[in-house]
């Protein structure tokens, strides 16, 4: 996701996408721990996406 795309989304969509990414990160960590995850870059990319969303939410003045 690009930061400009995130800035154009409404707050409700950002929060929904944040929750989806957090759930996906949890599942990816479980899969990595059980050696079922093929591409471990998924974890770091998901963490970056979460950080981008949190940054946009903070810029908009929304506390999570």
Image (cartoon, rainbow, N blue to C red):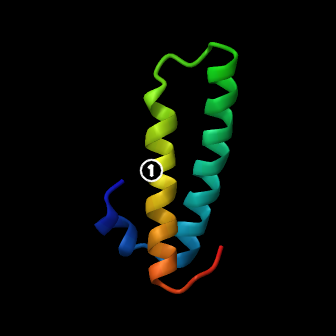
Q: Secondary structure at mark 1?
A: helix
Q: Residue at x 47, y 84 (%)?
A: 60
Q: Is residue 22 left or right of residue 42?
A: right
34 w.r.t. 24: above or below? above
- Residue marked by disc 1: 48
- Give x and y (percent) for residue 53: 48, 64
- Give x and y (percent) for residue 18: 58, 59
Q: Residue at x 47, y 33 (%)?
A: 42
Q: Residue at x 29, y 68 (%)?
A: 4
28 w.r.t. 59: above or below? above
Which residue ends up furthest to the bottom in the rendered image? 61
Q: Is residue 50 left or right of residue 41?
A: right
Q: Is residue 30 left or right of residue 51?
A: right
Q: Is residue 34 left or right of residue 1?
A: right
Quadrant location of the C terminus in the rendered image: bottom right
Name the foreground residue: 7 vs 34.
34
- Give x and y (percent) for residue 17: 55, 59
18 w.r.t. 14: above or below? above
């Amino acid at each position: 996701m690009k930061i400009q795309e995130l800035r154009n989304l409404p707050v409700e969509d950002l929060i929904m996408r944040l929750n989806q990414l957090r759930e996906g990160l949890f599942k990816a960590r479980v899969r990595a721990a059980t050696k079922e995850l093929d591409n471990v870059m998924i974890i770091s990319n998901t963490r970056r996406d979460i950080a981008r969303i949190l940054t946009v939410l903070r810029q908009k003045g929304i506390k999570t």
